[in-house]
Image (cartoon, grey):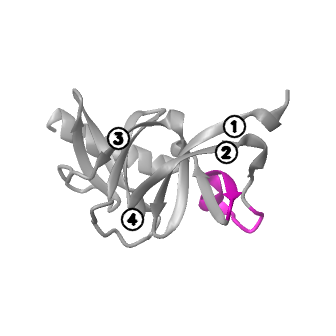
Amino acid sequence: MTAGHEEIQLVTFRVGGQEFGFNIFDVERVMRYESPASLPQAPDFLEGVLEYGETTVPIIDLRKRMGVEAVLAEETRTMILEWSQGRIGLVVDAVVELVKAPVDQIVSPPPFVRGLAAEYINGIFSRGGRTIIILAIAKILTSKERIALEGATSKATHGS
């Protein structure tokens, strides 16, 4: 197998001045920011739920999740992603572009990046002075946070 010719497409976005990316296959839709319905007793980074199609989708502010100032601006977007538990919405500062990244140019996080930060990084891609951190959607939330998210959204959608 020759990895040199393989590439993945990344949907790139900014959070707090840093550029990140998700594999295009994880991203279902990018929408203008719309204020979600808030949930009582939800974690700080869980903005609420948003009607999407015939369902409700939990909306997480990725900026708050990463400890970055969460300012609403014209460029603020909500990305709807597919993940193991269904769909999830992530609020980001701006969606930048679609980038083709050769697989053999994606590197692992450096050894000094440890713990949770290293866990939710799939790789790092650099080209032309840009560094894009490729995130793993499945690992952005800890298992404890996923349980809290499921509980909060279940109460909202089932009226408990």
- Residue annotated with mark 1: 7
Q: Are marks 4 and 3 in contact (CB under 8 Å)?
A: no
Up the image or down, 60 lies above or below 14; here it is: above
User: Which badge, 4 or 2, is on the more N-terminal residue?
Assistant: 4
Taking the spot 67% from the left edge, 66% from the top edge, the residue there is 129
Taking the spot 32% from the left edge, 62% from the top edge, the residue there is 44
User: Which badge, 4 or 1, is on the more N-terminal residue?
Assistant: 1
> Helix, strand or loop at disc 2?
strand
Q: Which mark is residue 150?
A: 3
As measured in the structure, the alpha-carbon distance from the residue carrying label 2 to the one carrying label 3 is: 33 Å
Q: Are marks 4 and 1 in contact (CB under 8 Å)?
A: no
Q: Evaluate whether residue 120 shows in this view.
A: no
Disc 1 residue type (three-letter): Glu
Q: Which mark is residue 64?
A: 4
As measured in the structure, the alpha-carbon distance from the residue carrying label 4 to the one carrying label 3 is: 19 Å
As measured in the structure, the alpha-carbon distance from the residue carrying label 4 to the one carrying label 1 is: 31 Å
Q: Residues within 10 Å of mark 4 (few under 14, many from 20)?
A: some
Q: Evaluate whether residue 36 shows in this view.
A: yes
